[in-house]
Image: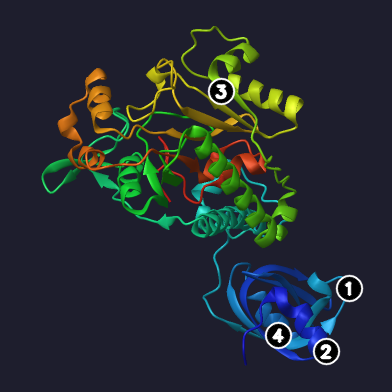
Amino acid sequence: MMRSLCGSLAAVHDAEPGSTVMLEGWVHRRRQLAGVDFVVIRDRSGLAQVVVTESTVREQVAGLPEETVVRVTGRLAATAKAPGGVEVVEPAFHALSAPALPSPVELWRPALGATLPTVLDHAALTWRHPARQAVWKIAAASLAGFRRHLDGAGFTEVTTPKIVDGSTESGANVFALDYFGSTAYLAQSPQLYKQMLTGVFERVYEVGPVFRAEPHDTTRHLSQYISLDVEFGFIDSHREVLAVLRDTLAAMVEGIRVTAAASVQMLSAALPVVPERIPTVHFTEALEIVGAPADEPDLAPEHERLLGKWALEQFGSDFLAVEGYPAAKRPFYTHPQPGDPRWTNSFDLLFRGLELVTGGQRLHHHADYLAALTARGDDPAGYPAYLEAMSHGMPPHGGFAIGLERWVARLLEVDNVRWATLFPRDTHRMRP
């Protein structure tokens, strides 16, 4: 007999009322009453209720604790109180795993009543909870929408090395490792590689892990996260990068709406509306809005929160782009603002008052790179392949990067990015 999914039983019953079906999944919940047992089975599609009245089967069910994997064969019957309006009766159970040990959390409860440390310590189990699964289904739908949109816009997906011989951002926040007797590092980003590959494919993107050895212990930072990187050529300014970012975010939201609607409903998530044109202010104007000193070199988290509130009040937008960041706070490859090199053709995108994306236009002339690296006290000899690409004809180009976990956390408005991370890595956690 072919396996039926729990979420498809209503359709099966509509097509063949009273038909026999086979389910395979986890024992999600058992309710043992005086004359009947109700067993809820969980699989990837949802939940199904099984009604047990025969005494020998009830004895068998008593030895199948929650989270035991089982096969259940039985007949479909309509009932308004069961999930999907249909349940399985006259069942036969067959255990596909040994009886599960007692769980540290009660996965059958509608809400997972556990602290974040408990949830993370037992992530292999807590991700089984339907509400936890819904979080990552939204993340997966975001990834699918990201890829689908960029594939349709002529981009080529690439993969780049995660073991590198130097720092991408000219900083010290890298993880060092022994590489056959030499010192290597985990990549902070694919930035230099995706720029080089723009000289090959014109339009590239990558979905992959990045590593930041920053001693942050905050609700918004991780030591490893998934970065959604985009880079493309033949642009005139960073505003074209922002336009592509806008369309990409809209596609991600639409992907969630189409393929993860049940997860959105389960979590009561409010999907954002991505405006046709994202409101944009210059960095200097942003400082005025939040009442910060004119010589402030960067936006603090409190500034971002205030700007998010201002954008919602002024434009009804969950998104605000801040452009023209000071050159001193941007990497060496960032293109200066024409006419005033104190500022740059770069931006941060704030989403609901939190920095989500950094992007902008890059330098593309070899001579400009030599000057920029020298001005920062960096040796051009440390970037041989990168500078070789720039010396053999690179188009004006730019790009951006979205942190997947931060995107999902802010979309769901949870108070810690770790709620949206499968197995987070931070200054305190290397397992599970």
Identify residue for label 3: 301
Q: Which mark is residue 66?
A: none
Few, some or many C-alpha atoms within 10 Å of disc 2 (few <14, some 14-19, many ≥20)?
Answer: some
Marks 3 and 1 sit apart, C-alpha to C-alpha, by: 49 Å
Dividing the image into 4 quarters, which one contains the N terminus? Answer: bottom right
In front here: 403 or 285? 285
The reply to whether the C-beta atoms of the residues labelled 3 and 2 are less than 8 Å apart is: no
Identify residue for label 1: 80
- Residue 2 relative to residue 54: left or right: left
Identify residue for label 2: 17
Rendered position, 78 above or below 43: below
User: Disc 1 marks which amino acid?
Assistant: Ala
The reply to whether the C-beta atoms of the residues labelled 3 and 4 are less than 8 Å apart is: no
Discs 1/4, front = 1
Sequence-wise, the earlier of marks 3 and 2 is: 2
Sequence-wise, the earlier of marks 3 and 4 is: 4
The reply to whether the C-beta atoms of the residues labelled 3 and 1 are less than 8 Å apart is: no
Sequence-wise, the earlier of marks 1 and 2 is: 2
Marks 3 and 2 sit apart, C-alpha to C-alpha, by: 58 Å
User: Disc 2 marks which amino acid?
Assistant: Pro
In front here: 17 or 206? 206
Q: Residue at x 25, y 25 (%)?
A: 373
Element on which disc 4 rests: helix
Few, some or many C-alpha atoms within 10 Å of disc 4 (few <14, some 14-19, many ≥20)?
Answer: some
